[in-house]
Image (tube, rainbow, N blue to C red):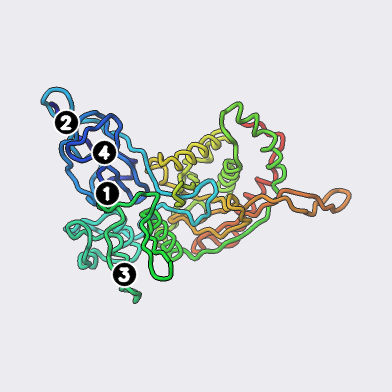
């Protein structure tokens, strides 16, 4: 019998390592082609590692909660063949994330981990720290020497995210919760189903519900964003009557021709991309006292997951896609988000985020910036309202399709003039929609 070395697959250009959440196959188990062997997590999404071969799992080379480098051998599978070790090519990973919202979720739906604004030399420590712990330490200005002194509750004393957050809370004078294992380190015996978080009843009929791993990441990212950026939100009301009438006119023909539904989301993204080209200083990030002007326009859109959590897949180079291309990209990312089929790279690299609070029937919102971006736009629900129109014969009142747009921006680098002008320009593109436009 030959032995096949299962490698930790490449999950994206910027992903160098992942944490093992759990093994779904145990030594001695028979494995079929594409069976999930184990589940892993990066600081962006959770993923499943499928088997590219059929055989029997002989050995697991890592345990749950271990952090493994991309390309490392993680398991040995016995397969039919000669007695020669086979080294496979990298397999692909399907990203599986827990709940998050989409095409219509408020900006408080950012799950992307923040880029580290402060660089530290972790090589000076003999202790291992995960990328998420390093990010938090850098954000909180905690030195490597200070990290080395914090007691860890993870495997072999590893410092988990919760250990570090509890230490920071204690350091800042808050109460300290008992450290718990990192969210990725779930015991095989005690793991609860992803769709059913563990609950504990207490007196009075109340329940304590433990956050799942993704909800903890979202919570941490939202708090970090508010601590990092002074948020300001501007609003405009837009008359989108022509846009609504145009979509109503073309949607049936479009679906028959392209086998795709056209929603308002690609229209919003097109308007945002155009406005960013007009006001490129919205498309920036901040590193200390440096402003990094982004070359690419990569627009993130919130996607809702079945579990209720939110994830933000990114449309890369959105300004280079026509409306047809944007529609296909939006539908594809939204569908694969809900089916937990996103790849880690598809949630990274965003330079601006769009969230649709109108999907909940909300008319406006004040979304939280998705760090390290400096702005996020929320689109509200479209309502029929009486509005005053100026005509050559005087003002008249007519029933129009109206909506609110809101922009939250980082007041460190985006002043009211830039933020307000950008938002107004997006509204102008939507209001001036050509009702006779062809889809291409």
**Earlier along the polypeptide chain: callout 2 or callout 3?**
2
Task: Please name which of the two marks, 3 or 1, marks the residue nearer to the observer.
Answer: 3
Q: Residues within 10 Å of mark 4 (few under 14, many from 20)?
A: many
Q: Does residue 201 appear left or right of residue 374 in this picture?
A: left
Residue 177's mark? 3
Where residue 78 is drawn, which disc sits there? 2
Which residue is located at x 80 percent, y 50 percent? 398
For the residues labelled 3 and 4, the Cα–Cα distance comes to 34 Å
Query: Residue 19 or 340: which is nearer the viewer?
Result: 340
Whole-Å distance between the Cαs marked 3 and 1?
24 Å
Upstream in the sequence, badge 3 or badge 4? 4
Residue holding disc 1: 19
Cα distance between the residues tagged 2 and 3? 45 Å
Q: CA distance from mark 2 to mark 4?
A: 14 Å
Query: Can residue 383 be seen by looking at this rendering?
Result: yes
SS class, disc 4: strand
Identify which residue is drawn at 72% across, 48% down: 401
Dot 2: element: strand
Res 61 quadrant in image? top left
**Mark number for residue 37?**
4
Question: Which of the image's four quarters has the C terminus?
Answer: top right
**Foreground label between 1 and 4:** 4
First in sequence, mark 2 or 1: give its number: 1
Q: Is residue 73 visible?
A: no
Q: Residue at x 73, y 50 (%)?
A: 384
**Do tag 2 and tag 1 residues touch (Cβ < 8 Å)?**
no
In the image, residue 22 sits, relative to residue 368, either above or below, namely above
Tag 3, which secondary structure? loop
């Amino acid at each position: 019998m030959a032995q096949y070395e299962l490698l930790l697959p490449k999950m994206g250009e910027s992903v160098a390592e992942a944490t093992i959440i759990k093994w779904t196959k145990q030594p001695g188990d028979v494995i079929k082609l594409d069976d999930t062997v184990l589940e892993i997590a990066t600081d962006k999404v959770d993923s499943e590692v499928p088997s590219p071969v059929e055989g029997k799992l002989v050995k697991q080379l890592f345990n749950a909660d271990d952090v493994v480098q991309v390309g490392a051998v993680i398991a040995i599978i016995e397969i039919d063949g000669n007695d020669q070790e086979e080294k496979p090519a990298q397999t692909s990973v399907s990203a599986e994330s827990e709940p998050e919202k989409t095409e219509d979720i408020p900006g408080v739906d950012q799950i992307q981990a923040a880029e580290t604004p402060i660089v530290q030399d972790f090589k000076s420590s003999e202790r291992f720290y995960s990328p998420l712990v390093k990010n938090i330490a850098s954000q909180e200005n905690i030195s490597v020497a200070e990290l080395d002194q914090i007691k860890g509750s993870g495997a072999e004393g590893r410092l988990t995210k919760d250990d570090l957050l509890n230490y920071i809370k204690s350091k800042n004078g808050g109460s300290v919760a008992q450290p718990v294992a990192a969210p990725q380190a779930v015991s095989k015996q005690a793991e609860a189903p992803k769709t059913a978080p563990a609950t504990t009843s207490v007196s009075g009929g109340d329940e304590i519900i433990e956050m799942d791993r993704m909800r903890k990441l979202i919570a941490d990212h939202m708090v970090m964003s508010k601590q990092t950026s002074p948020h300001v939100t501007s609003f405009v009301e837009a008359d989108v009557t022509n846009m609504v009438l145009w979509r109503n006119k073309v949607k049936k023909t479009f679906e028959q021709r392209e086998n795709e539904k056209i929603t308002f989301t690609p229209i919003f993204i097109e308007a945002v991309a155009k406005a960013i080209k007009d006001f490129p200083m919205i498309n920036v990030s901040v590193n200390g006292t440096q402003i990094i002007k982004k070359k690419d326009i990569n627009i993130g859109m919130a996607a809702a997951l079945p579990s209720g959590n939110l994830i933000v897949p990114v449309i890369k180079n959105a300004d280079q896609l026509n409306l047809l291309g944007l529609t296909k990209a939006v539908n594809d990312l939204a569908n694969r988000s809900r089916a937990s089929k996103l790849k880690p790279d598809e949630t990274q690299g965003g330079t601006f985020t769009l969230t649709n609070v109108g999907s909940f029937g909300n008319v406006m919102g004040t979304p939280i910036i998705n760090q390290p971006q400096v702005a996020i736009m929320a689109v509200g629900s479209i309502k029929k309202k009486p509005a005053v129109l100026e005509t050559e014969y005087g003002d008249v009142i007519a029933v129009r399709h109206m909506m609110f747009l809101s922009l939250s921006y980082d007041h460190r680098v985006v002043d009211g003039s830039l933020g307000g002008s950008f938002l107004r320009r997006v509204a102008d593109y939507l209001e001036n929609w050509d009702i006779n436009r062809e889809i291409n």
